[in-house]
Amino acid sequence: MKGAVKRLGVCLLLCLMLAGSFCGAVEFDHQVIYVGLDNPDDVVNGDINGDGLMDILCSEGNIHWFENLGGDPPEWRRSDPVAPTYPDWSGEKGYMAVWVGDFDGDRDTDIVAGAKGKVNGKDRPVLWFENLAGSGRKWKDHWLPEVLCGDHHDHSRTHDFDGDGCDEIITQKYHGGGVYYLAAVDGSRDHWKAWKIGVGRAGMSLCDVNGDGRMDVLIDNSWLENPADQARENWPVHPVPHSQKNVKNAAGDINGDGFTDFAHAEEEGNDCYVILSPNGERVTVKTDGKGLHTMRLEDFDGDADLDLLTADIHGGHAYIFENADGKGTRWTQHDLATWSREGSHNLWTADLNGDGLTDIFGKHYSNGSALEMWLNRTSQTEAGTIHNGTVWRDRSGTEIWCNGGHMIRESDTFYWVGYETRPRIGFQNIKLYSSTNLADWEFENDILRKEGPTSILGWAGRPGIVCNRATKQYILIFEADSQQWERHKVGFARCDVVDRDYELVRYVYPEGERSTGDQSVYQERDDAYLVCTLDKIIDGRRYLNQSLAIFKLTPDYLGIAEKVYEGFDNVNGDRSRNPRHHTSREASHIIKVDGVYYWFSSGLQGWRSTQTMYATADALAGPWSDLRPLPTEPASADSFNTQHDFVIPVTGTERTTYVYVGDRYSQHHEQGVGRNVFLPLVWEDGDPKLEWHAKWSIDTRTGCWSSMPTED
């Protein structure tokens, strides 16, 4: 339906049930805005008429903008042509390198574009169109320096590089003839000067790569560093390591480490990959593309890390690649349906309906194609909702088996490690799950299995993971039992990636021939500690679970350096071989809150639930206070039918919430439902209290939590 806006009567609802770091189900509402574009090339967004709504600009045979009339989904109206009809036009019709900016400082949206043909005697000139009165209804053309003529211009980008209140222009010749910085002279609308700042073709984008506060230019597989004086030729050029030439590009902090990373796609080729700084690690994202063109890094799922948008142009799809681990090392592909069977040529992103979510719009370059949009309908309903008193399942529907473990947070992803404790089955594996909201868990891997050097183990439990920033390794520490030695040693394994297979390093006793009971890990800045129940050897005989102890680990976290503290001895003198009811403790874990250390532990009752107790100290070496019961509300003599496991701090933008993780070994003692319980710990005048909530929700981005009503 050419010449009028055509919307689909029934929208295509694209429900991507995404796993990993996506917060629940992410939905995109795919709608066609207009069918019958005249050989389109570029799309971009801007508030063209100043009404506060985001409009869409599209270069066709002329340049048109689609007015956002509001609503959800928005209604659209196609404008009259922006550029005048030039009588002296020969060659190819239309415009490329179309972009928006404020070039005259009047705070409305102007347009820059490169003509595809010969206009008024100039071969493929570049112009900017002044938005008269800021209404988008009347435009005046201004011609930019003739040095830009002679070739198509593939891309333009705009930014106020010199801080004068007006945007300058970066434009790129299609066949690699140069990248130019354009600035108005003394605020003139018609007198501009051009500097050739570099060379390169294919992709172009803007990013402050080195964090100096000045916008740099990404061109092909390198970036041009913005000097203090932009009005100069040949900006410093920096190649991106391990990339290739002729790539589309985007940049941003993909893995959350503070360095700028790069996303590249072989122009109209097959390969898409990211380069992670500062070491230049290349991670493959896709190898079977069909003319990959678009490259955009955006947070589509609201989990505070960057996902990747790209698209085929030669018979394929548009794609969102989910940054599954928040670190750019694992990507999950999700297809977006397109109007054209060929895919999409240029896609761009903006919030089109004002709901705070990043939407997508674009088109294919073929004549008669459609302008289309994908409205982001991410739903946060039930995201982050924890249901206690139930059997938990992962995203695939498989029961979660994760007891006696530990949790770490990497960027916005929580990794939960634990062992599988099915009745009458010894050590089989140590499991790892991931989540961004502590409620929806994805099984990642059996990171340690009973095979090879671990096949001698009859038991491997109480695992904890610490990240050694100096060695850039994740260290798995666990209790290890074998018929080849007495009782538990401490096992150490390592891996370069948190969720891959761990390599066993060694088994050791923490002190002499003294063995351990339950254990956990504690990390503070660059130091890591083993926290354990410690056995004693008296007159050559081994007595189990006699005290609690803290050992500092070696700098590589792969061994024991020294004992920091030992105390809370078995004061009633129980000397049975395997005491179950004396006053020592197990299942202990340490956290630090407002400068005070809290040491939580359970009683020794086998698989049964017990009352949680805690002690406090100003230093790990003590002195530690006496043990006292952890209060509960409502009152519970066994911590709501759990054995204390650990406490995980959830630090957000507004507060820190401490989440108590308890094991309910119902598979062993057949009391209660479920094997895991998560509850909020609340602090009152420096004292913690455990509150029962059958159903509660936590926003891991803000750190705020709330109880939720349960069905009667």
Image: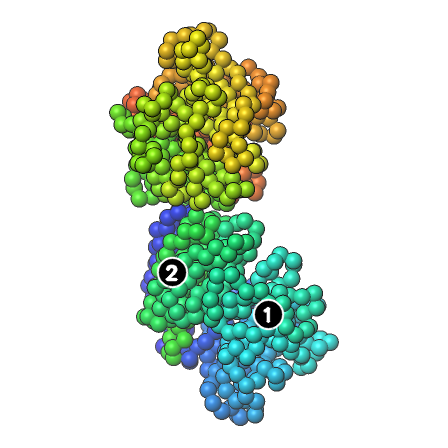
Between 403 and 696, the one lying in front of the other is 403
Specify the quadrant of the image occupied by residue 385. Answer: top left
Q: Residues within 10 Å of mark 2 (few under 14, many from 20)?
A: some
| Element marked by disc 1 | strand
Residue position marked by numbered label 1 in the rendering: 158
Q: Is residue 317 visible?
A: no
Residue 434 percent coordinates (x, y): 40, 42
Q: Is residue 312 above or below residue 701?
A: below
- Please name the residue shown 45% across and 44% down the image: 496
Looking at the rendered structure, the kind of residue marked 1 is Thr
Q: Is residue 335 left or right of residue 143?
A: left
Quadrant holding the C terminus: top left
Specify the quadrant of the image occupied by residue 448. Answer: top left
Q: Which mark is residue 535?
A: none
Q: In front: mark 1 or mark 2?
A: 2
Q: Are marks 1 and 2 in contact (CB under 8 Å)?
A: no
Specify the quadrant of the image occupied by residue 27. Answer: bottom left
Q: Residues within 10 Å of mark 1 (few under 14, many from 20)?
A: many
Residue position marked by numbered label 2 in the rendering: 286
Residue 71 percent coordinates (x, y): 46, 61
- Please name the residue shown 59% across and 20% down the image: 622
Q: Could you tell which of marks 1 and 2 lies nearer the N-terminus?
A: 1
Colouring of the image: rainbow
Please, which residue is most extreme toward the right here?
A: 186
Q: Is residue 289 above or below residue 675?
A: below
Q: Is residue 106 left or right of residue 580?
A: right
Between 652 and 161, the one lying in front of the other is 161
Looking at the rendered structure, the kind of residue marked 2 is Lys
Quadrant holding the N terminus: bottom left
Please, which residue is most extreme toward the left here?
A: 424
Residue 16 percent coordinates (x, y): 35, 54
| Element marked by disc 2 | strand
